[in-house]
Image: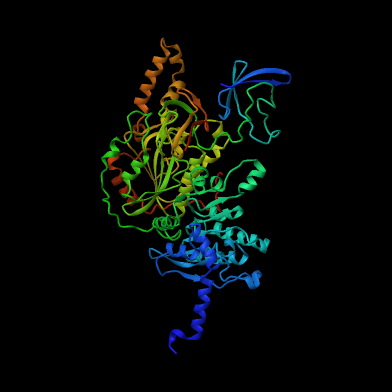
Amino acid sequence: MDQMTDPRVAALHAKQARAQEGGGADRIASQHAKGKQTARERIEMLLDPGTFQELQAFMVSPTDGENAIAGDGVVTGYGEVDGRTVYVYAQDFTVYGGSVSLTHARKIVRVQEMAMNSGCPIIGLLDSGGARIQEGVSSLQGYGEIFRRNALASGVTPQISVMLGPCAGGASYSPALTDFIIMTDKTSVMFITGPDVVKSVTGEVIDQQSLGGAMAHFTKSGVASFVAENEEASLALVRRLLSYLPANNIEDAPYVPPSDHPDRIDLRLNTLVPEDPNTPYDMRVAIEGVFDLGSFLEVQAGWAQNAVVGFARLDGQPVGVVAQQPMYMAGVIDIDASDKICRFVSFCDAFNLPVITFVDSPGFLPGTHQEHGGIIRHGAKIIYAYVEATVPKISVVTRKAYGGAYVVMSSKGIGADLHFAWPSAEIAVMGAEGAVNILNRREISQAEDPEAARAALIAEYREKFANPYRAADEGIVDAVIEPAQTRAVLVAALRALREPARQMPSKKHGVMPM
Amino acid sequence: MPVYRVTVAGKEYTVEVSNPRERPVHAVVDGEPLEVWVEEESPGIGMAPVVTAPTVVASPAPQAPARTAVAAGDVTAPLPGVVTVISVKVGDAVKPGQDLCILEAMKMNNPIRATFGGVVKTVYVTIGQQVQHGTPLFLIAD
């Protein structure tokens, strides 16, 4: 008898083959008919070929008795992405609709704990009908256990959730606690209460996709960090995202040898900012011109577009990029932009990514909608996140930097390590119109032609203060730089700041304004 | 502009409403311009709306204020400002990312762009009009 046909090995193979079938051929066919892959097929697409080691494949729920299906609706284990270990769990919709039993939850918790203890990222592939109702409250206990590990792992290892089917009710809070949510267009959906409950409570009639589909969360709620057109693209995005991230909070982010010259000059940047202060320009052009070509990966690109956040590389070193976008809502700071910036800066700090900020903001958005929505609470978070960040912080003022909106955006005062300005920068306590109306009220009212006097005074104020040189005189701006040279300046700045020795005061934790 | 005759506590008012979906609703009551924030739900909690439980006595048939101010397919103002340029007209086909109008706000000429493609069915605003956050600007449909 040769080694391959030992009956004990053959019995194992048979048992494994049965476990691999999940909910069976019919359920798999039905999953495929919906344009969805099975849990195992998804893991194959995500990981480097042949690297997946499944864990607890034979585990069953004790309450299922005769009907128990090996694996209990979730495939868990570890494998590699570009040679780096990640932990993964994939809910298997073919087994009881991917519903969560206590056993199912414990399998997830097992890989969550292993990921945290070994300092590796964890990727969740979610496709579940919800709690396994037959299990009653045990299932809820299971969710709680998962949420707890999500919260504990926050800031320890990166956590990424990929939405590949339904995720409704309280279950939404597991992905919500992770760092990034990638939603698959048209097939994934997330909501706390579905269309039926919404209709019975509020009378609103809305379908699942409009309420909680990928585009709703990508453009309206900000819940989705990314949207991808299909499962393959969603999983490819995980691999790309991981390329910017360290495996844990102690490691440095992976260096990728750049094909781009560190001193590359981009002459477009010298004329990017229009001379007319009322004409917008696209801040993405500045980002593309400065960072390693093609390296920018925007996060939450469809929501709060007045702020732009994302990952990029600067001479091979991954960094976090925060910018204001004059092309959308003039680049104002509003509630959503505050949330977006705060969360991103906090993530970068947790995972040792330097933060580079491009500033061009006319201020905070006025109005009852914002004030009563709590822009004071929300805006405060930006300051909090920047101050708390001990990673290198570099800011570049490209144009408008007025008043409080200037202070919150990684100013020297709140702790930027290096603060640069383009010659087009306008750094002042307030805009010319507002300042003249306060400072020269009497002069204007007593003038023969008040409007002409006002216009002349505004022009004079702009000439005097709407530039970076007052701030440079004060030493607040470290250097006024030629826009085309920004890349070389930032590459050198990052080298100069490589290891800022900086610690937060000893405390249990601060209380972020929410 | 639709004109309503509204009776409140026995007294009759003439009310003109240019766009009932706008928030605040800009109404003209007996010649007096008035901004009204319509309470969308939970009546009886918090502040009372400016106009309480009107009894509409005459035509046109009153349109119940839409539950959600914005219809599917509406492009809305992302921030308060003044419409200075309108680049499309009813019947134009538009592509995602195409400029629809310029909204001057925060001392910036903000391009308002289509987020989805379709045909312009309605232009709700005129040049020079002040709009609020969330005011519908265009209706775009297939």
Q: Quadrant of the C terminus of chain A?
A: top right
Residue A348 falls left or right of residue A194 = left
Q: Position of residue A399 (x, y in %)?
A: 37, 34
Query: In front: A264, or A496?
Result: A264
Residue at the top extreme of this rendering:
A448
Classify A323 as above or below B31.
Answer: below
Q: Residue furthest right?
A: B10
Q: Is A266 placed left or right of A379 in the picture?
A: left
Decide: is A500 above or below A403.
below
Q: Does the rendering let one see residue A482?
A: no
Closer-to-camera residue (A262/B41)? B41
Q: How many marks?
A: 0
Looking at the picture, how far across and down is residue A80, in whole percent?
A: 42, 66
Residue at horizontal 68 percent and vertical 61 percent from the top: A137
As drawn, A481 above or below A320: above
Residue B89, image x, y percentages: 43, 28
The spot of residue A227 in percent (x, y) is 46, 50
Q: How is the image coloured?
A: rainbow
Q: Is residue A471 visible?
A: yes
Nearer to us in this view, A398 or A106 = A106
Judged left or right of residue A3, residue A289 is: left
Q: Work out whether residue B118 or residue A369 is closer to the camera in this orientation and state it.
A: B118
Q: Quadrant of residue A1?
A: bottom left
